[in-house]
Image (tube, rainbow, N blue to C red):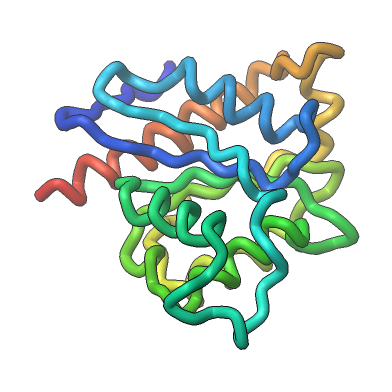
Amino acid sequence: MSPVIICRMKKKILAISGSIRAKSSNLSILRLIADMMPVAVQYEIYSGLDTIPLFNPDLDTETVAQTVTEFRKKIKDADGILFCTPEYAFGVPGALKNALDWTVSSGEFTDKPVALITASSQGSRAHESLQHTLSAIGTKFTKEETLLISFIKAKMDQEGTVTNVATLASLKTVIAAFLKSLHDSEK
């Protein structure tokens, strides 16, 4: 049975792919999730990770780069953030970690509900590492709002569509848990 996805009030979700590849499996998953969203959700896939400059604490002042300011604003304005990332060299992709580093001092993620999907060949190390980073920057998430999809390429067709029934069900379950958290944060 598919989980019921409920959202009573208009919510904004910012989805972030940890991969900057145009044909990333993670981006395909985020697009699939867009189709799962209820009407009461404004869902945006962020596409600017590759425009954020390398983090340098010396440059983290009141006049940071415009792309950093825009990224921080998108996070601040969102009710929740959904990450879908691969694992690169047993870790979090550099572009994603770099973007998150720019938010440490500014605090946009503090008490922000997040969900994390790691879809990769293996993925367990990046999945664990990103959970540590998300905890360090003050996000809120539960185990039910995380999903590790190992061997993702075997669960998709050539066009990047998830074809594995169990994976589709797991995605729906994680999204339902995430939307429930967003709903519960209304109270």
**Horizontal relation, residue 17 to residue 89: left or right:** left
Residue at image point 65% right, 17% down: 165
Q: In the picture, residue 73 is in which quadrant?
A: bottom left
Residue at image point 38% right, 42% down: 178
**Horizontal relation, residue 39 to residue 185: left or right:** right
Q: In the picture, residue 164 is in which quadrant?
A: top right
On the image, the x and y values in percent for residue 88 come to 85, 55
Total numbered labels placed on residues in the image? 0
On the image, the x and y values in percent for residue 83 come to 56, 46
**Horizontal relation, residue 40 to residue 76: left or right:** left
Residue at image point 32% right, 19% down: 38
Q: Is residue 144 above or below residue 7?
A: below
Residue at image point 44% right, 34% down: 175
Q: Is residue 16 above or below residue 54?
A: above
Between 35 and 54, the residue placed more toward the observer is 54
Seen as rendered, the residue at the extreme right is 89
Between 5 and 139, the residue placed more toward the observer is 139
Q: Is residue 97 above or below residue 187?
A: below
Q: Where is the N terminus found, in terms of image quarters?
A: top left
